[in-house]
Image (cartoon, grey):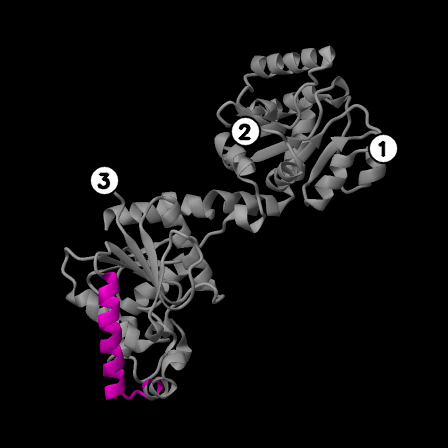
């Protein structure tokens, strides 16, 4: 069964820059990426994706750009023939564009006053459509009459009253619980009449992340972990990787979900490196930590093709991980500390020279004579002081566009 076709409506889209324009572009890309036929119907804009057509109806722009005189008349509460002519023109053009569309999603048009002829035309289309026609989801980022500045004497008068009335055939979406409460009061309906679907962010685009890094975190469920510890290291004994594994075990035993990412493979030309790697794998198995100790050298991004940790992927892992765990027994310098600092990644490392020289007092030091359990307690306490970590986890779990689409948007399309 094919997915329903979707039309997204707004006053403008790319290259016009604004908060709603950014959101509708993200929504359109999500629909296209998930094989929904999607198009934008806007007052001004240009195509930004090869599979997302953009239909421009200039009368759908903000009214002050279409007809400044008519806009002033409406602000003064006057309805003229010009209003009706423009409304009817928009109605015909918009109705034609919505022909054959299964779901149309106007953003702000039914709750904001920026083009009242458009609001009136769209309201008429919704009223005229039968239940067999397209379904409407009104996406409400804002509402004119929740702002006291716009609580004018025209509020109950056509067409202004359309902005404070819940249309019977419309499914409403608010972008936050606060907006939901405001719309509920404005429409005089129960809050459960209004869905809440938040705005989101695309970390891949925002941080220029590689698809490989995100696939690693998705594959191993790392966004669901309380703590993702990163150890960029070669597989050699002085790196003390067994201690990192034991610390990971202890943190999990204390009720915190933790995983350890290890970047490099064993050196194929060094027999001791291979033996050491094998012993680490055995240790992870003995501690029942096989799913928590992730050797990236074993990960296949594509079938039969293992990844290489290049500079881009290394940077991504610094950005996505929660701390650098660096319990090495001996170093000549300590480059990972510099890299962590640039990436704003908290550092937990051995109290050895030259790491103390590089890091000063800005990290958590581990005394290598302590037991892993004590080190785990120190790490849990140290990371508890980083409030930004909790916010990062909250955002990555709840406000990533892909998660919002899967958990909120697509299910709504299926039940309306």
Give the CA separation, mark 3 to mark 1: 63 Å
Taking 270 as reference, is 205 above or below it?
Answer: below
Front-most of residues 39 and 227 = 39
User: Is 4 situated left or right of 218 in this image?
Assistant: left
Q: Secondary structure at mark 3?
A: loop
Q: Is residue 412 above or below residue 230?
A: below
Residue 274 figure quarter: top right
Q: Which residues are magenta?
A: 74-98
Q: Is residue 63 left or right of residue 323?
A: left
* Secondary structure under the numbered disc 1 in the rendered image: loop
Name the residue beneath numbered marker 3.
1
How many residues crowd around disc 2 within 10 Å: few (fewer than 14), some, or many (20 or more)? few
Mark 3 Cα within 10 Å, few/some/many (few <14, many 20+)?
A: few
**Residue 265 vertical placement versus 337 (above, below):** above
> Which mark is first along the chain, 2 or 1?
2
Mark 2 vs 3, N-terminal side = 3
Image marks 2 and 3: residues in contact by CB distance under 8 Å: no
Which residue lies under the disc numbered 2? 255
Predominant SS of the magenta segment = helix
Q: Position of residue 391 (x, y in %)?
A: 55, 47
Foreground residue among 32 and 117: 32
Q: Quadrant of residue 335?
A: top right
Find the distance from the CA under tag 1 to the CA under tag 2.
Answer: 33 Å
- Residue 76 lies within the magenta run: yes
Residue at 26% in and 55% down: 103
Quadrant the N terminus occupies: top left
> Residue at label 1?
354
Q: Position of residue 10 (x, y in %)?
A: 36, 66
**Residue lying farthest to the front in this orientation:** 50
Residue at figure coordinates x 24%, y 76% from the top left: 89
């Amino acid at each position: 069964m094919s997915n329903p076709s979707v039309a997204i409506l707004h006053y403008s889209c790319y290259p016009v820059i604004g908060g709603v324009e950014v959101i509708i572009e993200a929504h359109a890309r999500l629909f296209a990426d998930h094989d929904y036929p999607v198009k934008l119907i806007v007052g001004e804009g240009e195509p930004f994706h090869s599979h997302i057509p953009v239909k421009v109806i200039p009368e759908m722009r903000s009214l002050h750009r279409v007809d400044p005189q008519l806009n002033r008349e409406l602000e003064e509460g006057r309805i003229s023939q010009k209003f009706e002519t423009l409304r009817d023109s928009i109605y015909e053009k918009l109705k034609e564009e919505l022909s054959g569309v299964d779901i149309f999603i106007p953003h702000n048009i039914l709750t904001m006053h920026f083009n009242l002829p458009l609001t009136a035309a769209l309201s008429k289309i919704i009223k005229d459509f039968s239940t067999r026609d397209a379904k409407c989801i009104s996406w409400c980022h804002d509402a004119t009459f929740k702002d006291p500045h716009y609580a004018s004497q025209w509020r109950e008068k056509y067409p202004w009253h359309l902005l404070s009335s819940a249309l019977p055939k419309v499914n409403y979406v608010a972008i936050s619980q606060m907006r939901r409460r405001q719309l509920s009061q404005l429409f005089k309906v129960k809050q459960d009449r209004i869905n809440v679907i938040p705005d989101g962010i695309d970390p891949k685009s925002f941080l220029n992340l590689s698809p490989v890094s995100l696939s690693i975190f998705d594959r191993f469920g790392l966004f669901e972990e309380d703590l993702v510890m990163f150890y960029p290291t070669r597989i050699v004994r002085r790196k003390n990787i067994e201690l990192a594994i034991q610390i990971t075990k202890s943190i999990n035993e204390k009720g915190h979900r933790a995983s350890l990412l290890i970047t490099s493979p064993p050196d194929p030309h060094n027999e001791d490196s291979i033996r050491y790697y094998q012993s680490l794998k055995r240790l992870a198995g003995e501690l029942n930590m096989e799913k928590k100790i992730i050797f990236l050298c074993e990960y296949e991004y594509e079938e039969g093709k293992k990844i290489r940790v290049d500079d881009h992927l290394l940077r991504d892992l610094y950005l996505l991980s929660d701390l650098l765990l660096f319990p090495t027994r001996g170093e000549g310098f300590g480059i990972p500390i510099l890299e962590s600092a640039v990436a704003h990644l908290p550092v937990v490392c051995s109290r050895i020279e030259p790491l103390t020289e590089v890091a000063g007092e800005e990290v958590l030091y581990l005394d290598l004579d302590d037991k892993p359990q004590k080190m785990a307690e120190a790490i849990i306490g140290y990371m508890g002081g980083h409030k930004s970590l909790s916010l990062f986890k909250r955002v990555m779990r709840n406000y990533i566009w892909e998660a919002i689409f899967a958990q909120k948007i697509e299910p709504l399309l299926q039940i309306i």
